Image (spheres, helix red, strand yellow):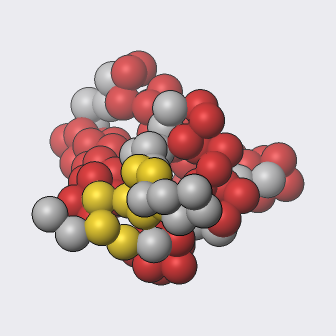
C-alpha cells in the first residue's frame, strides 16, 4: 500500500483540485484518507483503478461499435463519463462531431 498526496493524484488522474473534491463529494472518485489535522492522502491503487475504469468505459464503447453493436447502457455510461469533465461548449462540439461522422 502506498499513499500519495494531492499533487500526485492530480498528475495520475489528469484532474484539477476542484474536480477531485467535487467528484469525491459525488461519490465518483476515491475518498481521501485523513493523516492528521491538516494532511490527507489517497491510496495510489484506488486512484489508478479509477483511471483504468475510465479507460475501460471508453474501450467498451469503441469495441462494440466496430462490430456494429452498441448497447444503450454503453452509450449512456460513455456520455456520462465524457460529459462529466467537459464544459457545455465542449460537449456540444463533441456531439456535432459524432453526428457528422454518423452521416
Q: Where is residue 67 in the image (x, y as percent from the top left)?
A: 20, 42
Query: Is any atom of residue 40 visible in this view?
Result: yes
Residue appearing at x 28%, y 53% in the figure: 46
Q: Which residue is drawn at 38% across and 21% down?
A: 73
In the image shown, does 5 or 57 lie closer to the viewer? 5
66 or 56, nearer to the observer: 56
Seen from this angle, which residue lies furthest right?
89
Quadrant assignment, res 74: top left
When the figure is inspected, residue 64 is found, relative to residue 87, above or below; the finding is: above
- Return the x and y of residue 17 as percentages of the image width and height: 66, 65
Q: Is residue 27 left or right of residue 103?
A: left
Q: In this view, does 84 lie to the left or right of 61?
A: right
Q: Nearer the viewer, residue 41 or 28?
A: 41
Extreme-front residue of the structure: 37
Residue 1 % position (x, y): 14, 63
Asked if residue 54 can be seen in this view, the reply is no
In the current view of this chain or complex, which residue is farthest to the top? 72
4 over 31 or under it: above or below: below
Q: Residue furthest left?
A: 1
Residue 10, above or below 94 = below
| Residue at (57% x, 57% y) in the render | 37
Amino acid at each position: 500500500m502506498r499513499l500519495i498526496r494531492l499533487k500526485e493524484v492530480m498528475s495520475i488522474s489528469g484532474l484539477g483540485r476542484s474536480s477531485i473534491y467535487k467528484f469525491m463529494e459525488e461519490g465518483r472518485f476515491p475518498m481521501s484518507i485523513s493523516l492528521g489535522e491538516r494532511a490527507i492522502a489517497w491510496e495510489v491503487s484506488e486512484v489508478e483503478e479509477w483511471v483504468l475504469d475510465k479507460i475501460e468505459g471508453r474501450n467498451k464503447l469503441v469495441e462494440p461499435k466496430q462490430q456494429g453493436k452498441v448497447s444503450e447502457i454503453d452509450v449512456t455510461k460513455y456520455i456520462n463519463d465524457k460529459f462529466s469533465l467537459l464544459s457545455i461548449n465542449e460537449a456540444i462540439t463533441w456531439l456535432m462531431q459524432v453526428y457528422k461522422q454518423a452521416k
